């Protein structure tokens, strides 16, 4: 028979001195964090212990510089997280697939986000074919994604731009892998509302960028994939965080027409810029709403900020276009736009 003595006679647990010296700061930080949280929300941990109901699953890189919750300002319990080297999703990785299944089937998350980052060490090792040991087998999946776009990547001379493009393509390829899992296919087949997203984070400025591949049904996988890949290699591609100045940010040596172009009762406005070579562009803003535009000549719409849906001629589907992306429209056609958030745009004539 086991007897239990008075609590006061029990020896308290202690951390060995060497470990204590190493980890004391972490324990101090933990206590301070708890005090700060409970001061703001006294019952925070009580509620947290009783449920887990996140809306998001983050599949990201294990890099210590990319803290998932902090980047998007979410508290514990608000996002389910899986991380590995280079944010890879492969059908043989039961760890990742188990997280995905639990998130989709049981937690009922509505958004699965594959989040890469510029400057990823795993992507760089794969790109340079560095030999690091066991991890080389894992990074082979990143190389496979890279090799799918070998021809296009060969045309990039700048090593930094090449590195950035491969980081972006790796995210898009892993989103494709997520969409092809039985977990996601089965969820869509039963009508579950779950969308897969492609995001990339810049350690340089702390900003997330949308790579444009967002899919919420099986039929949308390949159109979204092709569009996202096409955007990566577009000459107007503006996601590179290392560029000193985006081509969509600043124009020089232009004449600005003071008179505004006003459409749809003022919900869409723009001004015309004339460049030294005689070419023109229009810079404008669209307020939320649905609009139908007509073109006299072919044009490219560059979205500098905001979010809209566009239905192009000959298509029955709406395409998502977000800040940093663009689309082209042929001459003498009509197209529809559904602006979801205030959108800033630049229109160039082709």
Image (cartoon, rainbow, N blue to C red):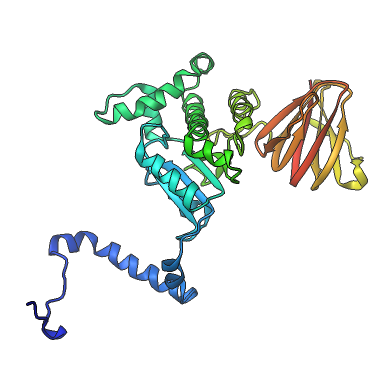
On-image quarter of the C terminus: top right
Is residue 252 visible to the viewer in this orientation of the structure? no
Name the residue located 55 percent from the left edge and 46 percent from the top edge. 111
Judging depth in this view, the residue of 327 and 187 nearest the camera is: 187
Quadrant location of residue 320?
Answer: top right
Quadrant location of residue 293?
Answer: top right
Residue 311 in the image: above or below residue 4 = above
183 horizontally vs 268: left or right = left
Name the residue located 13 percent from the left edge and 86 percent from the top edge. 6
Is residue 9 visible to the viewer in this orientation of the structure? yes
Q: Position of residue 263 (x, y in %)?
A: 91, 41
Q: Position of residue 62 (x, y in %)?
A: 37, 43
259 horizontally vs 327: left or right = right
Q: Position of residue 344 (x, y in %)?
A: 75, 42
Judging depth in this view, the residue of 284 and 136 nearest the camera is: 136
Residue 132 in the image: above or below residue 81 = above
53 horizontally vs 49: left or right = right
22 horizontally vs 312: left or right = left
Count of all numbered marks drawn on residues in the image: 0
Name the residue located 23 percent from the left edge and 60 percent from the top edge. 23
Residue farthest to the left, as pictured: 1
Quadrant location of residue 17?
Answer: bottom left
On-image quarter of the N terminus: bottom left
Judging depth in this view, the residue of 29 and 327 nearest the camera is: 327
Q: Position of residue 188 (x, y in %)?
A: 58, 39
Name the residue located 77 percent from the left edge and 30 percent from the top edge. 316
């Amino acid at each position: 028979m086991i007897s239990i003595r008075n609590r006061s006679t029990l020896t308290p647990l202690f951390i060995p001195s060497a470990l204590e010296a190493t980890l004391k700061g972490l324990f101090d930080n933990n206590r301070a964090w708890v005090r700060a949280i409970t001061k703001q929300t006294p019952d925070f941990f009580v509620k947290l212990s009783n449920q887990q109901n996140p809306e998001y699953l983050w599949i990201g890189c294990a890099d210590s510089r990319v803290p998932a919750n902090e980047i998007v300002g979410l508290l514990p319990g608000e996002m389910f997280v899986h991380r590995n080297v280079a944010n890879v999703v492969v059908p043989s990785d039961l760890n990742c697939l188990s997280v995905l299944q639990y998130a989709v089937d049981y937690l009922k998350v509505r958004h699965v986000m594959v989040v890469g980052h510029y400057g990823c060490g795993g992507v760089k090792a794969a790109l340079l074919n560095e030999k690091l040991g066991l991890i080389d087998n894992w990074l082979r999946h990143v190389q496979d994604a890279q090799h799918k776009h070998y021809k296009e990547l060969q045309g990039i001379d700048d090593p930094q731009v090449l590195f950035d493009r491969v980081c972006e393509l790796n995210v898009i390829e892993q989103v494709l892998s997520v969409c092809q899992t039985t977990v996601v296919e089965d969820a869509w087949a039963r009508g579950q509302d779950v969308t897969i997203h492609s995001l990339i984070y810049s350690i340089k400025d702390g900003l997330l960028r949308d790579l444009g591949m967002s899919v919420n049904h099986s039929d949308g996988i390949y159109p979204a994939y092709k569009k996202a890949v096409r955007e990566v290699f577009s000459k107007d591609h503006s996601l590179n965080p290392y560029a000193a100045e985006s081509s969509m940010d600043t124009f020089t040596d232009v004449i600005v027409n003071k008179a505004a172009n006003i459409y749809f009762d003022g919900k869409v406005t723009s001004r015309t810029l004339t460049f030294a070579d005689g070419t023109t562009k229009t810079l404008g803003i669209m307020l939320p709403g649905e609009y139908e535009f007509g073109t006299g000549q072919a044009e490219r719409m560059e979205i500098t900020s905001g979010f809209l849906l566009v239905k192009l001629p000959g298509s029955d589907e709406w395409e998502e276009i977000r800040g940093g992306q663009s689309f082209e429209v042929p001459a003498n056609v009509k197209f529809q736009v559904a602006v979801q958030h205030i959108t800033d745009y630049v229109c160039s004539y082709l």
